[in-house]
Image (tube, rainbow, N blue to C red):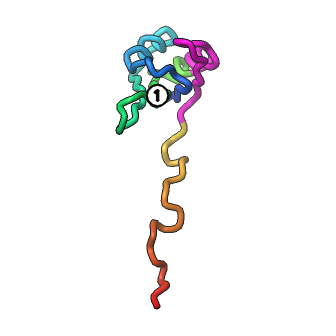
Amino acid sequence: MGTKLYVGNLSFRVTSEDLQEHFATAGAVESANVVFDRETGRSRGFGFVEMGSDDAAAAAISQFNGQEYDGRNMVVNEARPREDRPRGGGYGGGRDRGNRW
């Protein structure tokens, strides 16, 4: 499995195919996908690219991070695992926590 990169600050016109073609200049791309809003169907302005190797991922970061693409300066870095993000809900998801009267 390759190294997954987060790609942010994308133009809303950029498609997953565009991203794949653009990143292929840095090395082998296993997958590329732009994230879309479920309700509006519009791009959310970021996506993920999985590069075929750590070397290709490092090349893509150094080649594209901060560089202009379709009128916007991309942010490219290694994607953090999903588990690192806090899940919503906060205090136990609404249980009454034993406060029975």
Res 37 quadrant in image: top left
Magenta extent? 58-79
Amino acid tagged 1: Gly
Q: Measuring from the top left, give residue 47's x and y in whole percent.
A: 46, 28
Quarter of the image with the N terminus is top left
Count of number-bearing discs = 1
Counting from the top left corner in percent of width and height, residue 69 is at 54, 13
In the image, is 38 to the left or to the right of 44?
Answer: left
User: Residue at horizontal 41%, vertical 23%?
Assistant: 32
Residue at point 45%, 27% (across, down) = 2
- Please name the residue that numbered disc 1 is placed on: 47
Q: Residue at x 37, y 16 (%)?
A: 17
Mark 1: few/some/many CA within 10 Å (<14, 14-19, 20+): many
**SS class of the residue under badge 1?**
strand
The quadrant in which residue 38 appears is top left
100, 3: nearer the viewer: 100
Figure check: 1 above or below 39: above
Q: Is residue 59 magenta?
A: yes
Residue 78 percent across, percent down from the top left: 56, 30
* Relative height, residue 84 to residue 35 (above, below): below
